[in-house]
Image (spheres, rainbow, N blue to C red):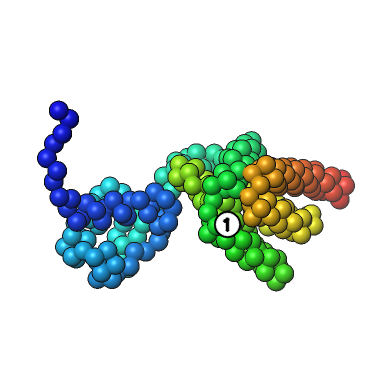
Amino acid sequence: MPFHHVTPEKLSTAVIRQIEELILRGILRPGERLPPERELAERLGVSRPSLRDAIAALQEAGLLSAKPGAGIYVADVLGSAFAPALINLFARHDEAVFDYLSFRRDMEALAAERAAKYGSDTDLAVVQTVFDKMQAAHETRNAEDEAQLDAQFHMAIVEASHNVVMLHMMRSMYELLRGGVFYNRQVMFKQRTSRAALLDQHRLINAALQARDPDAARTAIEAHLGFVEVSLKDQKKAERNEVIARQRLKHETEG
């Protein structure tokens, strides 16, 4: 018969499972510091030795890391999603940039559909809150904040889709975006008045989500990323044209 003795679960095992679930669901994020040992043990209702056993096991599994004198942090597991050689290869070729946008369009359209269907009221409140911050940054013309909030807005949609595989995959993609591997939002739009257009596109995405309209959410995401692709192509073309123009000027002045 397929039965076996039931054994009580060790407290450290329960702690491991809880922290693993928080990391899996994207609630504890890479680089986030855990509370001090005494506080965390109290929150979890376990002894400090049990907590230490759990932390040691999670460190061995590569999910947590210790920084001497600073505490315990969620490991940067996203940093290993792409090998450094591949990241450098991406950065050197425009083909990777446009493949990246195509991939994002497909994945985020699906995420937006799922968020409109399955996201809780709290999930959508998070999206709304980030969008409100985007509007405030737009009004103060804080380009750096706008760029960061742009990524947060899209990640909030992915989080609201409640697919943990998509969540971690897309989070790793956004880390490359924030690092300027694929493109830089501020540089890309420097020759085109598009800040207002971008905000309007995000407003449409947010409105569709708040209305729980999956089709409208998908359409709005696809239109937004299509606009980003066209804008980026225009910028790349302008950069190539500038190189040629400088060559002509040099030839005329030195000829």
Inspect this view and state whether residue 144 appears: no
Residue 55 is left or right of residue 167, and the answer is left
Of residues 32 and 6, which is closer to you in this image? 6
Identify the residue at image location x=19%, y=56%.
Answer: 11
Q: Is residue 36 above or below residue 119?
A: below
Q: Position of residue 212 (x, y in %)?
A: 63, 50
Inspect this view and state whether residue 43 appears: yes
Toward the front, the furthest residue is 1
Q: Position of residue 38 (x, y in %)?
A: 24, 71
Toward the left, the furthest residue is 5
Three-letter code for the amino acid on which mark 1 is drawn: Leu
Of residues 238 and 113, which is closer to you in this image? 113
Residue 147 is left or right of residue 168, and the answer is right
Q: Is residue 234 above or below residue 206?
A: above
Identify the residue at image location x=22%, y=61%.
Answer: 51
Toward the top, the furthest residue is 1
Of residues 179 and 45, which is closer to you in this image? 45
Residue 41 is left or right of residue 85, and the answer is left
Q: Residues within 10 Å of mark 1 (few under 14, many from 20)?
A: many
Identify the residue at image location x=45%, y=45%.
Answer: 164
Residue 4 is left or right of residue 203, and the answer is left
Identify the residue at image location x=60%, y=48%.
Answer: 116
Q: Position of residue 35 (x, y in %)?
A: 33, 67
Q: Where is residue 255 in the image (x, y as percent from the top left)?
A: 87, 45
Quarter holding residue 44: bottom left
- Helix, strand or loop at label 1? It is helix
Total of numbered circles in the picture? 1
Of residues 136 and 234, which is closer to you in this image? 136
The residue that label 1 is drawn on is: 124
